[in-house]
Amino acid sequence: MRRFPEARIAWHNLGATLGDLGRAGEAITATQTAFRLGLDAPETWLVHGRALIAAGRLDEGEAALGQALRRRPAEVAWSAELANLVWMRRGDLTAALEVLNAAERAGAPVPLVRMRQADQMRAAGQGEQAWTLLKTACAQAPNVGPLQLAASQAAMNIGLATEAEALARRALALAPGEPAVLNQVCIAALALGRPAEALQAALQGLERAPANQSLWGWAAVAARQAGDPLYATLYDYDGLVRIFDLPTPDGWIDMGTFLADLDAALSAQHLYIREPANQSVRQGSQISHLLTGSDDPAIQAAFRQFAPAIADYAAALGPGADPLRSRNTGAQQVHGAWSVLLGPGGSHSNHLHMEGWISSVFYVATPQVIAGSAAHEGWLSFGEPPITLDPPCPPERFVEPRPGRLVLFPSYMWHGVIPFSTPERRLTIAFDVTPV
């Protein structure tokens, strides 16, 4: 860009890269320069819109995503992005679905549209409707593997394990050996009380995708149910779940003052009234742009404080053959970083982090009721999968949230937040780490 300052594509690429790095203000300047130089590509409007949204300029960002879709109206992924934004901002499922309906009217592939519509329905608590929609779509397009897989997941979400297994097997026939499909076969077998078969499916998938965190997570559940020693290796809580009560960063007189500044910086970005689709947040909001790119002093200081703890965690792991230690190169990087704000009744459903290696939670503000709670209200729980099993598979480890506390753990480890009922807030930063 410096060599060719009039190259509008260079300005677009710079804006896209800055946006990916979480540097929203600079990304906006770059895309505006590309527009000034005459670029009017839908991709540039998309990058511009994402940057505006990350900067908190939601009206402008929504309008920019609309501009991208006016130029490419049948782009399903972009339509889903705008639909999700509409949902998070206004909680209006009808308006969110209309964005996807417009993509269908413009000629978007119907199976892809149905899958995204189902995502929005689940976010609105309409799991039954999502299942009905996808079941019908499967009958109309029986050879679309991803659609069969999505329908299987929808069936599992409402407890229809037999239907989920049949659809997963159909998807497997269309894509033999596909790790994502074997992951769903494993889940269905677990729900139907066949843990040995489930473990075999997960391990088969891991032969092709040895770093797949979901497959490791479900393999652990299957091993636990089957009494396989693999579970003890994967869920060594004492060695793999580490708690760090961080010191006050330089420039602040105490941790309370620092956390108040960090709270203000993060709260200013929590502009949504609903949680995003396909995420684990319940009764709260999530900001998903990369926080490491923020120029706020408190957010920058937080990540400086995290770095020594991450290095300590990786060093303590050492080498090994298990899925965590085998990837330990001795160098790490933050791969994604976001914030979650839970309100009254808020929780995280049990989940894992597909894109990570080491995952985390850092507590900025916590409700008073959770301190020492015998019922573990608002506490971090480990070990419970997001489906009901027989015999039960309850959480095995709980960590009490405290402001200033960082918890690090394997990304494949199932974790969630126990609901709390008081009118207080629970504000966190979370991030994933990957080896370099």
Image (spheres, rainbow, N blue to C red):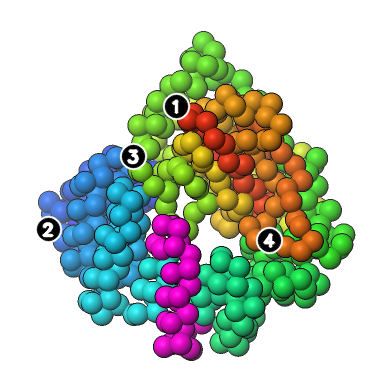
* Residue type, mark 2 in image: Gly
What residue sits right under mark 4 in the picture? 388
Q: CA distance from mark 3 to mark 1?
A: 14 Å
Q: CA distance from mark 1 to mark 2?
A: 41 Å
Closer to the camera: disc 2 or disc 3?
Answer: 3
Instruction: Give residue 316's quadrant in the image.
Output: top right
What residue sits right under mark 3 in the picture? 271
Query: Of the residues under marks 3 and 1, which one precedes in the sequence?
Result: 1
**Relative to 224, residue 191 above or below:** below
Contact? badges 2 and 4 (CB < 8 Å): no
At x 70% / y 46%, what residue is drawn?
382
Can residue 287 be seen here? yes
What residue sits right under mark 1 in the picture? 263
Secondary structure found at label 2: loop
Q: CA distance from mark 4 to mark 1?
A: 36 Å
The numbered dot on residue 287 is: none
What residue sits right under mark 2 in the picture? 38
Query: Of the residues under marks 4 and 1, which one precedes in the sequence?
Result: 1
Secondary structure found at label 1: helix
Q: Position of residue 393 (x, y in %)?
A: 75, 56
Number of residues whose C-alpha sits closer than 10 Å to that of mark 2, classed few (under 14), some (14–19) or many (20 or more): few
